[in-house]
Image (tube, coloured by chain):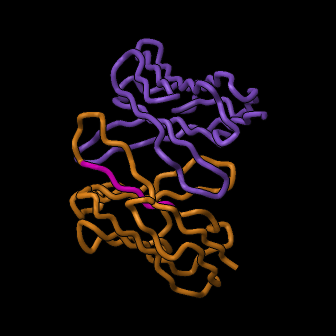
Chain colours: A orange, B purple
Amino acid sequence: DTEVTQTPKHLVMGMTNKKSLKCEQHMGHRAMYWYKQKAKKPPELMFVYSYEKLSINESVPSRFSPECPNSSLLNLHLHALQPEDSALYLCASSHTSGTGDSPLHFGNGTRLTVT
Amino acid sequence: QKEVEQNSGPLSVPEGAIASLNCTYSDRGSQSFFWYRQYSGKSPELIMFIYSNGDKEDGRFTAQLNKASQYVSLLIRDSQPSDSATYLCAVNIFSGGYQKVTFGIGTKLQVIP
C-alpha cells in the first residue's frame, strides 16, 4: 500500500469544467511534488513545494494551479484544460534533507481525461 | 544531450537470467540515483537508490554507480515474469529543501517464461 494517497483515481472533465486533484501523505515529508506523465514518456516535473512554499514551477500553464494548505496536503486545481492535458498526474513526497538518501515516494496517480 | 539517457528497449531476457539495465547522465553535480519500476498504467515504485560509488545490493537487485563515468546500472538476478515492466532511471540534485529529480525515458524489460 502506498503511503501517498491521491484522489480521485480517475477523472473525466470537459474543457470548461473546474476540478481539483488531491494528494495526502503522512510520512512526515516536507517536500511535495506534482508530476505529469503521458503514455510511454517519463514523468515530467510540474511543481515542487518545500515547507508549504512553492519552490519550483516548471513553466506550467496557468490553467494548472497548485496549492499546499499544510504539510500533509497538496492540491492541483484544474480549469479550462485542453485535450492534450490528458495524462497520469502523479503526486510525490520526500524528506527535505540533502543526504542523498531521500527518494521520491509516489502516490498511485490520477488518470485525467479531458474531453 | 539528454540529461538522463536510457535505452528504451525492449530488453528481453529468459526467466532465471540476469537482466542488466543501464543509464548515463550528463550533470556531474548529480547527487543520488534512483531506479523505479513502473507497470503499465501504474505509478512508479522505488526499487533501489544509490549515492556512493560502487555496488549496492538488495535481494535480487544490485545497483552500480560510477560517478567518474556518469553511469548507473541495475542488475536483476533470477529474473521473473513479474519483473516485466518499465524501469526508470532517475537522477537527483538536492537544492534548498527539495529533490530535483529528472527521469530517463525508461527501459522496457520483458522476461520470457
Please identify the dominant SS of the magenta region: strand
What percent of the width, then of the height, locates residue A62? 47, 71
Give the residues drawn in magenta, as a range: A90-95
Quarter of image, res A68: bottom left
Residue at image point 42% right, 42% down: B101
Quarter of image, res A107: bottom left
What percent of the width, then of the height, locates residue B48? 44, 34
Q: Nearer the viewer, residue B93 or B46?
A: B46
Q: Nearer the viewer, residue A5 or A65?
A: A5
Q: Which quadrant is the N terminus of chain B positioned in?
A: top right
Count up the numbered dots: 0
Q: Residue furthest top?
A: B68
Identify whether A108 is placed above or below B85.
Answer: below
On whether residue B105 falls in the magenta region, the answer is no
Quarter of image, res B54: top left
Residue at image point 65% right, 58% down: B41
Q: Nearer the viewer, residue B84 or A109?
A: B84
Q: Which quadrant is the C terminus of chain B positioned in?
A: top right
What percent of the width, then of the height, locates residue A110? 54, 68
Q: Is residue A60 left or right of residue A31?
A: right
Residue at image point 34% right, 29% down: B31
Residue at image point 46% right, 20% down: B64
Identify whether B102 is placed above or below B50.
Answer: below
What percent of the width, then of the height, locates residue B40? 67, 53
Q: Is residue B99 left or right of residue B20?
A: left
